[in-house]
Image: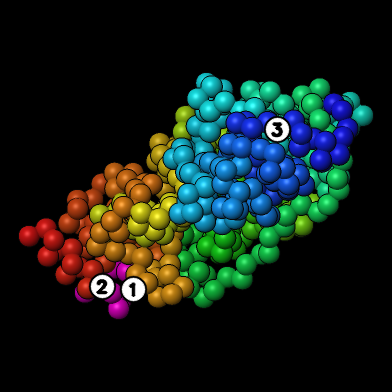
Amino acid sequence: MKYVTAEEAAKVVQSGNRIYVHAAAATPNILTKAISDRADELRGVEFCHIHTEGPAPYADPALSESFHTNSFFIGKNVRHTISAGNGSYTPVFLSEIPNLFKRGIVKVDVVLIQVSPPDEHGFCSLGVSVEGTVAAIESAKYVVAQINKYMPRTFGDSILHVSKIDLAVEYHCPIYASEVLQISEKEEIIGKYVANLIEDESTLQMGIGSIPNAVLAQLTSHKNLGLHTEMFSDGVIDLIESGVINCSQKTVTKGRALATFLIGSERLYKFVNNNPFIVLKESSYVNDTAVIRQNPKVVAINSALEVDLTGQVCADSIGVKMYSGVGGQMDFVRGASLSKGGKAIIALASTSNKGHNRIVPFLRQGAGVVTTRAHAQYIVTEYGIADLYGKTLKQRVEAMVEIAHPDFREEILSAYHASIR
């Protein structure tokens, strides 16, 4: 490992190269900026990644001759590139991203990572994000790392020896931290409904945001819960510290919480630092349905942009406009369904913040079906729970109308029946 400046490290990138960027709160923004500053010298460089945090200067449409963005999950800092033409989206399950690199389907020239300082044995940590980064490191020609003392030290697949790093830039700054969102009255109601579906000794998967936090806030009286999730945030801390989440009954990494990345506040990063209870592994393992299903009573809690009356779940686009991505929703929906006593839950408010209906007779034209109607089990809104598993289309329509906003129920039912006559 050779220490250099960010500007010197950026020179390893050549025109036509493909770069993989460490994800979420681990995004090494000092490195992406240094490469972006070379725009006049470079042509046809591709940045690929799942969502990243912080500025993405390479995503400026004015630099389209120099840089192209290939998102495996679209974050808000690059969402504009899809319509502007300097960005693309690759539909892929989070569980399969490492395989893109391992099988040479997506060949990587340079991988940019952010790691903790090496310990006395020469090992750094990838900290708060593993996802597909390990596979990218193993297949890339060059590995460039930002060494940052603020990166938490985590265990599992995140441990990386300095011999795997070609160039290192020492730059210390707090990593991206998100605010803990306030739970609204509507979200609290949804949280209570979902919590009522969770039994003691269940293994939880949930994402980030107010609804997952609202669910977690209702679990303080539960016992012996486990955590096997693609990511987690601050909502789990109190439950772990109180012993509600102790992972004693789960099968995979028994006695420890398992994830592939995490994002949250500074409190979360302090909590996971040097904490052997937290294990981070590649998404090809964490999100593997064959691994997930080994745990008892897996409860997968995910969200959606809209759901139709038959149970088709759109979570990646608004009509034809790509918004996010497939991510790991289907990995865990299927994994939970196959788990003994497992439950797959889609939780969402019945209307958007702008008052638009989200329980719809049909998905918008061009909308992506992330979870099919055959995979859908429980759909939850602030108006109740629709249990769709094993139900006919007619029974599903009746159940879904009951959890739609009252102002739209007659309208969506009339539209649905008019179309099938």
Observer able to see residue 263: no
Tag 1 residue: 405
Which dot marks residue 13? 3
Q: Residues within 10 Å of mark 2 (few under 14, many from 20)?
A: some
Which dot marks residue 253? none
Residue 397: name its quadrant: bottom left
Give the residue furthest to the right: 120
Vertical relation: 306 (above or below) 44: below
Q: Residues within 10 Å of mark 3 (few under 14, many from 20)?
A: some
Observer able to see residue 417: yes
Give the residue furthest to the front: 40
For this view, does 244 lie left or right of residue 327?
Answer: right
Give me the C-alpha separation between circle 1 and circle 2: 6 Å
Q: Residue at x 57, y 25 (%)?
A: 107
**Location of the N terminus (image quadrant):** top right
Residue type, label 3 = Val
Give me the C-alpha separation between circle 3 and circle 1: 52 Å
172 or 210, which lies in front?
Answer: 172
Tag 2 residue: 409
Q: Residue at x 78, y 27 (%)?
A: 165
Give the extent of the magenta segment: 402-410
Q: Residue at x 30, y 59 (%)?
A: 364
Residue type, label 2 = Arg
Q: Secondary structure at mark 1?
A: loop
